[in-house]
Amino acid sequence: MVATADSRDTSVVRPADTHDVFNQAPPLEGYDVFSADPALVEGLVREGAGWARSDLERLGLLAGAAPTQELGRQANENPPVLHTHDRYGHRIDVVEYHPAYHQLMTTALDNGLHSGPWADPRPGAHVARAAKVIVWYQVDAGHICPVSMTYAVVPALRHQPDVAGAWEPMIGSTTYDPSNRPVAHKAGVTCGMALTEKQGGSDVRANTTRAEPVGGGSDGSYLLTGHKWFCSAPMSDAFLMLAQTPGGLSCFLAPRWQPDGTRNPIRIQRLKDKLGDRSNASSEIEMSGVWSQMVGEEGRGVRTIIEMVNHTRLDCILGSTAVMRQGVAQATWHATHRSVFGKLLGDQPLMANVLADLALESEAATASALRLARAYDAAPDDRYEHLLQRLLTPVVKYWTCKRAPQHAAEALECLGGNGFVEESMLPRLFRQSPLNGVWEGSGNVICLDVLRALAREPEALDAYWSEVALADCGDGRLSRAVDDLHVDLSDPITLESRARSVVERMALVFQASLLVRSAPDVVAEAFCASRLGGGGSGVFGTLPMGTDTAAIVARHTPT
Ligand SMILES: Cc1cc2nc3c(=O)[nH]c(=O)nc-3n(C[C@H](O)[C@H](O)[C@H](O)COP(=O)(O)OP(=O)(O)OC[C@H]3O[C@@H](n4cnc5c(N)ncnc54)[C@H](O)[C@@H]3O)c2cc1C
């Protein structure tokens, strides 16, 4: 058949021959992802990083632009490819990423998402970075993994000042340089972590990787032999790892290239075919004599690497918060453009209830994430903030990450069938949503960490009560929930088997106290009524009668 001039001209959108297309929501693009999220804007200022507002507005506009969203789609739909050998059979262990992934990484590093608070540690630096991560994660989650690990590696490296002195200036560079060569020839670096082995990820003390000192170990160099079962971002320039020495489990930094300019023998066996996080490579590696440097004291590997783990846990919270915010943005946008049974979807009372409930969850997650980020800012010089950071990191991680999958499923349902279709981006959010609950401590392990914090640093609970009490007079339901929580925590014998329900209530009380203090009354009232008032089923869309759902939805709908 000969194509007519008209049918070849793809720039002209013509009505279909059979029907008019109407009542479909336009794509949510060309908006400022940051400014459209009042909970994020207000939280940024409240937690001491108002100075970063113009940077965030710029990043927010970029994140919401159609070409950027297209990059996110491409990065997600073109997962990385492993090349173990070159054409001649030499081992190369190279992972090839889609160009869109590299572009997203370039922006992430340019905005200091990987190192801002270390390179420029002004008050509010962790809060500013947290807000940026929440914004940029909404474009594509996968590439944030190496960004998070690079950010988190620094406090652990500082246990070994000579190693930190060599690496920190490179980590502080805002240039993304994906080239595979020794760091001396690079303009910037990224870092990873490899703890999980086949026989155990939560129980890292079961690690079997061995470290042998080079030349007696006098210069802190070791050769690592063994494997790691999850090693995300395997093209990182260096990895923190745990390995056994005669003195016990210790922490090491293994670069991709050895000091003599040859490749370190880190063999990438294969890449994982994952549920979500598709743009990012997660690999299985084997090591035979990998050159590394000890970080921190011999035998104190867990104590050293926990510094990194805590910072990646903060990023798990930020990632799940971003998933929820993007779900709310997509669902409310759809509901303000789609009509059903003669009314806008968002004006149907039952849908307004669902949307408002989703928005409350997102707002509570945002407020608690940013308050926690402030604790990261202040902790080094302030004991109270240190104690809050210690206890609230696992409390907030547990609850935020637990809520994200339910939230994503419900946001998807708001779009009906369109939400189940890949083009809507909701399936991507849904597949991503469980990840942060698994990574860096799964639900039970995180709850047990809360109990560990309570047992080892009882003052942390005092700090928690003080923080919550800042809103004590604000809501009777909050006061009663605090009293109930005191009772819950009073019986340590049965605490382990009750840990999930206790940690959930600790999170809810903390979130309620923040909202009572700082959110609009309509938001705080609805949160306390639905989360502390009893009677809720946990299903979204069950806000009690009298809730001003329209006001809550209007606050959270992108314009
Ligand atoms: C996409 C992705 C990327 C990852 N990237 C990395 C990476 O870069 N580096 C890295 O080191 N790891 C990485 N991981 C691994 C991750 O950190 C581990 O999967 C996680 O820590 C759990 O370890 P595991 O898989 O061995 O499960 P297990 O430790 O076997 O745990 C299985 C289940 O048992 C529960 N459990 C464990 N102990 C207890 C207990 N005492 N009481 C009750 N319940 C318990 C856990 O909560 C979990 O639900 C990644 C994982 C994913 C999904």
Image: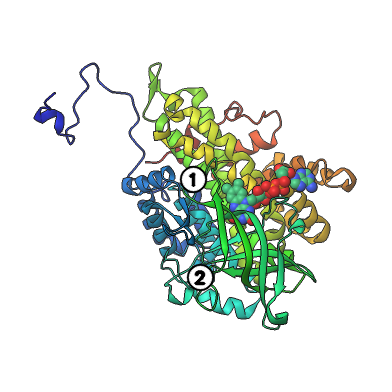
Residue at the image position 59 percent from the left and 44 percent from the top:
435
In x, y percent, where is residue 108?
43, 59
Residue 559 shows up from this direction: yes
> Which one is in front, 502 or 342?
502
Q: Quadrant of the N terminus?
A: top left
Residue at the image position 45 percent from the left and 30 percent from the top:
419
In x, y percent, where is residue 395?
69, 50
Q: Quadrant of the C terminus?
A: top left
> Which one is in front, 78 or 379?
78
Question: Which amino acid type corresponds to the residue marked 2 in the rendered image?
Answer: Ile
Residue at the far left in the pictured view: 5
Q: Dot 2 lies on which element?
A: helix
In the image, which disc is placed on residue 278? 1
Q: Nearer the viewer, mark 1 or mark 2?
A: 1
Residue 314 shows up from this direction: no
Name the image quarter holding residue 444: top right
- Marks 1 and 2, how far apart in space? 25 Å
Residue at the disc numbered 2: 171
Establish if 170 lies above or below 143: below
Question: Which amino acid type corresponds to the residue marked 1 in the rendered image?
Answer: Arg
Name the image quarter holding residue 86: bottom left
